[in-house]
Amino acid sequence: MPSFYAAKGIIHQTSCVETPQQNGRVERKHQHILNVGRALLFQSKLPKTFWSYAVLQATYIINRIPSPLLHNESPYFLRFQQHPDLNELKVFGSLCYASTIQNNRTKLDTRARKVVYLRHKQGVKGSILFDLNTKNIFVSRNVTFYEHILPYKNTHSSFDWEYHSIPHDNVHNDTAPSRAHSEPIVVIDDPPSISASSNLPHSPHSTLLHDITDPPSESTSPPSEVEHNTNLRRSTRPIHKPSHLSDYVCNLLVDSVQPSSTGTPYPISHYHSYANLSVDHRKFALSLTADEEPASYNQASMHECWVQAMDVELQALAQNKTWIFVDAPPNIKPIGSRWVYKVKHKADGTIERYKARLVAKGYNQVEGIDFFETFSPVAKITTVRTLIALAAINSWHLHQLD
């Protein structure tokens, strides 16, 4: 590579050790890929041994989804000038059934293998799968997907397997412990019974289990010394905050730990008044609350700013043709209306505008007279995601309306 750089006139520079900020763009993309890869592992509940497949699948997904930084285009489209085929995108860690090869089966053998989908194989028209029975990883073309089923989602079985990239001698080493070895250490239901060494079976993990259940106790003071410390006399000298902190709320730690006379941890008597502020800070605090929002039309009509806000609202309603004039039915009283006033502030606290809204008194409506059915077009984001997931699984067409 140095000779190639020299021939092309490229200056090769490397970052210093432990300074990722010198290569911020690449480090940020690494963070993006790892965030997606962790999400795939958390969703599928696959062991961390599959982290490499999760990272590759995350890269495969990122390259095929639109990005706001690319004007809502995908990296795949910018590279090949055509939209990617998302039919090859499957759920990571989902259940699959791969067809067995005819040469390796008899008439009474199963025609499919229960596997887990890992990723799409680059350069081959097939998928990388993990056999749940033989614990082998292979590539197959004839696969039936069940993307709504995650085999490792609700299972707690031990995970002990090997494939070409993990040597057999290093499967059970200390650097990569299996789940079968970690479960007896983590799941402890009755700590007192474990402390009895006579009830524990003799196993190579018994020493480690004993070390976990019986940690070394920290050095503590004798009871006599504790009683002596509780009888120490506190100073009665009043504590005053510095003068330069007079405009700030300063709560002493000793005040927060002392119990109140009422027994409540946060008594209502602890409040802060404008009288404790300096003149400049008091004027600033009062200026933020000087513009009160009127509660009625009579109060708003006495200020020019609210009159202009009401004129703007009426002009907008007339321009949008919000209503039409009709004759009221006999013996029917029309539903009234009222004004709602709101002061809009900017991020720095200054006033942006005065907003007035004319709303109907919907609480006066009577079912069967003013309305027959109710409809609230409010949807949770969880419901929207569920519908989109069902549409993707069943190949439905989505239609949006407002």
Image: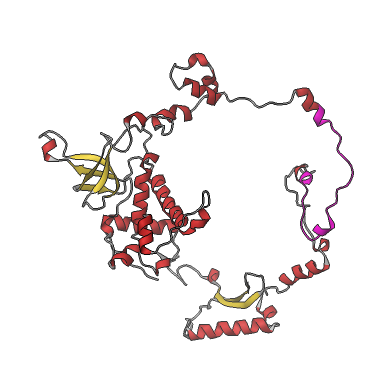
Q: Which residue is at a point 36% across and 31% down the rendered structure image? A: 170
In terms of depth relative to the viewer, which is nearer, 278 or 50? 50
* Most common secondary structure along the magenta stretch: loop
The quadrant the N terminus occupies is bottom left
- Measured along the vertical axis of the image, is residue 399 above or below residue 308? above
**Residue 104 visible to the viewer:** yes
Magenta residues, start to end? 228-255
**Residue 47 visible to the viewer:** no
Where, by quadrant of the figure, is residue 165 drawn? top left
- Picture mark count: 0
- Measured along the vertical axis of the image, is residue 126 above or below residue 293? above
- Measured along the vertical axis of the image, is residue 218 above or below residue 71? above
- Residue 347 percent across, percent down from the top left: 62, 69
- Residue 46 percent across, percent down from the top left: 37, 41
In terms of depth relative to the viewer, which is nearer, 287 or 46? 46
- Residue 376 percent across, percent down from the top left: 45, 65
Where, by quadrant of the figure, is residue 213 drawn? top right
Side of 271 relative to 141 (left or right): right
- Measured along the vertical axis of the image, is residue 30 above or below residue 293? above
Side of 40 relative to 308 (left or right): left
Is residue 303 on the magenta stretch? no
Q: Which residue is at a point 65% across and 70% down the rendered structure image? A: 348
The quadrant the C terminus occupies is bottom left
